[in-house]
Structure formats: C-alpha cells, structure tokens
Amino acid sequence: MSEKKTLAVTDQRCRFYEKEFPEKDELCIARFDSIDQTNCYCSLLEYNNARAMILLREISRRRVRSVSKIARVGQVHVAAVLRVDAERGYVDLSKQNMDEDAVKEAENRYNHAKVVHIIMAQLAAASGRTLLELNEKITWPLYAEFDHAYEAFEHILECGRTVLDAEGPNSWRAREDLAASLDFTLLDELFDTLAESIRRRLAPCPKKVKTVFQLTCFNPAGVDIIRDALLAAERLSTANLPLIVRLDVAPEYVIETTTPHVNSAKTVMNEALKVVKEAMESNSGQFTLLQAPFIQEEAAGEEK
C-alpha cells in the first residue's frame, strides 16, 4: 500500500481570506508582473495571486519619459480597488489619492496575514492536510471573530490550551459565533504543533529594561541601609524575571533585566523602586528617581 502523498509547504496555495476577491475601494497588496506602454499587470498577493491590472496613469499623473521610472516588474505596492469582475476573475486598481495612514494599515494587515499564512501552510504540510481545509475550518473563523487571525494567534501564545477549555475567561468555546464555526476537534488534534509554530514565529525578542536612581544616606549606618534597600529590591526577582541591582556611578544605582515581557518587567521594577524608596526614607535616607523603567535600545536610538 502506497503512502499518502502530502504537499510541501511551498506547494500549499490558498488565498489569505475567506472572500475570493477584494472589495471595491479596499486597499490590497499588488506585485507588478509585466508592464507595457499603458498598463501594468499585477498579482494580488493576499488573494492567491489573483489577476489585476492598473493603468499607468493610475500610478502617476505626471508625464514620464520612461515607464521604468514609475513602475518596475517585481515591485510590490499598496493599491486601491476600482472595479472587481468576479466572473472573469479580474480586478482594476489605482494608486491615486490613497491616505497614508490607510496605506500603513494595509501593509500591517498584509504582514500579519502573511505570518498567519506561513504558519498554517507549515501546519498543513506537517498534518498531511490541504491549506484550504485548515483555512476553512480554523483560520477563517478566527478572522471572523477577531480583528485579525494574528490577534487570535497572539491569544494562543499568551493563554495556551486554555483557549480550548469549555469555559473560562480565555475560552473560545464560550464565544458563541466562534463555537459555531471553528472546528474544535481538528484544532485540538493539531494544537500542539500549531502552538509551537506560533511560539517560534510570534514570540517577542528579549529586550533590556533598565531604571536608574540615586541613593544617599548620611546616617552612621548609611552603607548598611543602602545595601539592605538594594537587597530588598533584588528579592523581587523571579526565575522568569531576574533583576540585576548594581552600582553604576556613585551615588547612582541601576536595576536591569533582559526579557521579552517588557510590560511585566516595568511593573516589577516599579515595585522594586517603591521598596527601595520606602526602605531609604524610613531610615533618614534619600531616594531620587533619575530614569523610570525604559527599554535601553529605545533610549539609545533617541539619543542619536
């Protein structure tokens, strides 16, 4: 008996969204495939490379001596949909009069949708199913329930298998519309593989979070008071969020950590600062905050 043939990741082909074509006035991502003296023929990357066309005058109103100055084969642009012929499978586009914020939003939507598409294509290849089947049973119901399927994947990254619980604050089964459209049996079967792929693709990169403060104490036991205050802050460390408390340049001190969970780090650091302040002020010492918790790379970028 021959083994079941499965499609490789690169062979998985499917549109990103449930609808087969974009709607009129929608902004979508178009790749320029061929160009003549009047037209540019495109593929719509979010719609399984559906055919589209954009007149050169819809790319630029100004006169140009060479078409290559305004359009080149292989370029990818955001374009607005003028007309859709669903029967012929053809779409007319324009790049005129597009709002800059809307363009950025379309680019962000596409980038997130591309990540979702890659994750689901990998899942399809690993499970021996087609990408279309997984989209119909998992991805597209998530798009209908959340603002974007990428948001649903972030939910999986944060909450894990609790999204499959029968009830609870993270339960997807408790969402009436999602419970009716999502194939929970299939999702449960493939969940571990899906979650691992999401973790690899979506997990944030670790960042260094830091805070700087000044401590002074003229009490005869001042050295001990400062040491005890810093040790109290250090005791707020956890296995997942170790705090490094050190002297920078006297009398300045630093608390820092490296973590992908920036918001949690800032919360714990603020608690540590509060502990240090209370310990100093209760023993006639002085605490001065010089820099609230910040991402060190961001601050360095601002100084340039």
Image (cartoon, grey):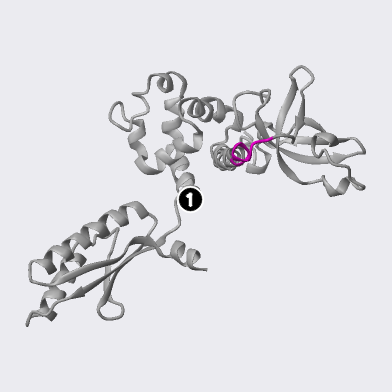
Quadrant in the picture for residue 40 = top right
Where does residue 236 sit, x and y in percent of width and height? 20, 61
Please say if 266 is above or below 232: above
Which corner quadrant of the image does residue 124 belong to?
A: top right
The answer to which image quadrant residue 131 occupies is top right
Q: Please give the name of the residue rendered at 63% of the width and 39% of the height, measured from the top-left corner.
A: 103
> Magenta part of the protein: which range?
98-104
Looking at the rendered structure, the secondary structure element under dot 1 is helix
Q: Which residue is mark 1?
A: 200
Amino acid type at mark 1: Arg
Q: Is residue 151 magenta?
A: no
Q: Is residue 224 left or right of residue 102?
A: left
- Count of picture labels: 1
Residue nearer the viewer, 144 or 287: 287
Magenta span dominant secondary structure: helix
- Residue 5 x %, y %: 64, 36
Q: Quadrant of the N terminus?
A: top right
For image coordinates 53% across by 27% down, the residue present is 140
Does residue 7 appear left or right of residue 171 in this picture? right
